[in-house]
Image (cartoon, grey):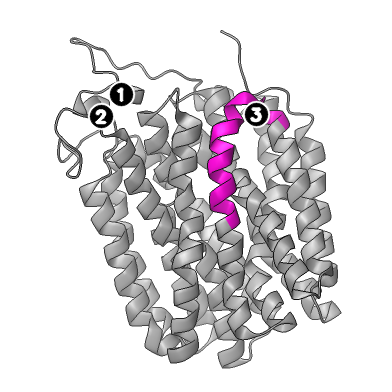
Amino acid sequence: MTTTTNRVYLARQGTFPGWWVVGGCFAILFFGSSLGFYGMGVYLNAFSKEFGWNISSLSVATTFFFLIGGLWNVVVARLITKFDVRYLMYGGAVVGAGSLYMMGHVSQKWHLFVVYAVFAVAWSSSGLTAATTVVTRWFHVKRASAIAAASSGLSVGGILLTPFIKKLIDDQQMSGASIWLALIWLFGMSVPAFLLIRPDPLALNWMPDGEPKPENHVQDLPGVPMAIAVRTKFFWIVTIGYILVMGSQVGAIQQIVKLVEERTTAGTAALATSVLSGASVVFRLVGGKIIPKFPLAKFMVFIAAVQGSAIILIGQMENTILLFVSIGLFGAMVGNVLMMQSLLIAQRFGVKDYARISARSGLVSLTGTAIGPILIGSIRDASGNYTLPYLVAGCISLCGALLFTLSGPAEVED
């Protein structure tokens, strides 16, 4: 693996720069989630209102976005093992900016699929696999706290930037807003990658968690090879469980802005992602502290069950206050569900082939991420409201929780 510099620009010389690297990953995920993951729900709402396209067809486009992103993620995992991860991030910054700009020129549905495909490649190049791979290399003992801090960028982006994006698109429509979306993406991705992110502590003469690298140290990353990991029961239970849990989660998130707008007002709907993401940030950081105190697999059962219950409640609530309380409960689980897949795989299989194992699991789990928006969108179009689709989505998450009880422990005895 090659590197382009031997220092983190904002860190003092002689001090462990690992937490600055975490900050860089936080920033990358901040912009990636606000313009990508959470942004897809805003774009769905915008194209629906501007062109009158039905929700189910737009949900297919969203599904297509996640499918292409998942497929490209497998390529990303291979490239990370050979090249400096920042090269991927720089490429994603340029390609993503171009695709966001072209969203303003979409006038037919097939245009949307082409633009989403290109944007998915850019989004995946700077996504969760890249960020968590970097963090797992820099931290072993404090991995849960480090991943919690870095992945909080996903939620903070939803709190601070996504509402601004929605207002920008509401005011200027996609045609006027796209140039600003492109510039935000370009600088938001490239600057943190240049200043803060470094792919490996050993290249900077550090060991994981901050110990200086001994002289004549030979790098030997611990862990299970991918060929062995993908044949284990644990891998497949976690992977299939995430089909159900992430399918229900992503489907619910992508439609939540439209659900709240239908039941309240457009201005109130803009707060939905902020409440969802705010709860996600707070409870993700809490989770980073308490997760090491519990068996990981059992903790996953708990949060998947609570997530399912919260989604069901969202679908039932017409009162604005109770609706937002339910969204907050859902958000509290969202952050922990997202980072638990990384923690489960890293805990059970180690760092050696983490990127490839994580990407392979994520690709299979993407089935749920892809089907979730279509399922909820189709049921919503058929039923005329969101009560039934959110009931179905919540029950799917509860089924995922039940499946996780069969995985066995993530912790492996020496």
Amino acid type, callout 2: Phe
Query: Magenta residues?
Result: 279-298
Amino acid type, callout 3: Leu
Q: Is label 2 in contact with label 1 (beta carbons under 8 Å)?
A: yes
Q: Is residue 285 left or right of residue 380?
A: left
Q: CA distance from mark 1 to mark 3?
A: 25 Å
Residue 379 shown in magenta: no
Q: Residue at the location (29% across, 41% down)?
A: 20
For disc 2, the neighbor class at 10 Å (few under 14, some 14 to 19, many from 20) is: many
In the rendered image, which residue does mark 3 sit on?
296
Q: Which mark is residue 210?
A: 1
Q: Is label 2 in contact with label 3 (beta carbons under 8 Å)?
A: no
Image quadrant of residue 220? Answer: top left
In the rendered image, which residue does mark 2 sit on?
16
Mark 1 or mark 3, earlier in chain: 1
**Front-most of 242 and 215?**
215
Q: What secondary structure do most residues of the magenta stretch adopt?
A: helix
Q: Nearer the viewer, mark 2 or mark 3?
A: 2
For disc 3, the neighbor class at 10 Å (few under 14, some 14 to 19, many from 20) is: many
The answer to whether residue 105 shows anywhere in this view is no
Q: Relative to 92, does residue 178 appear above or below in the rendering?
A: below
Amino acid type, callout 1: Gly
**Front-most of 289 and 189?**
289
Assign a secondary structure to mark 2.
loop
| Quarter of the image with the C terminus in it | top right
Mark 2 or mark 1, earlier in chain: 2
Q: Residue at the location (44% across, 54% down)?
A: 124
Residue 290 shown in magenta: yes
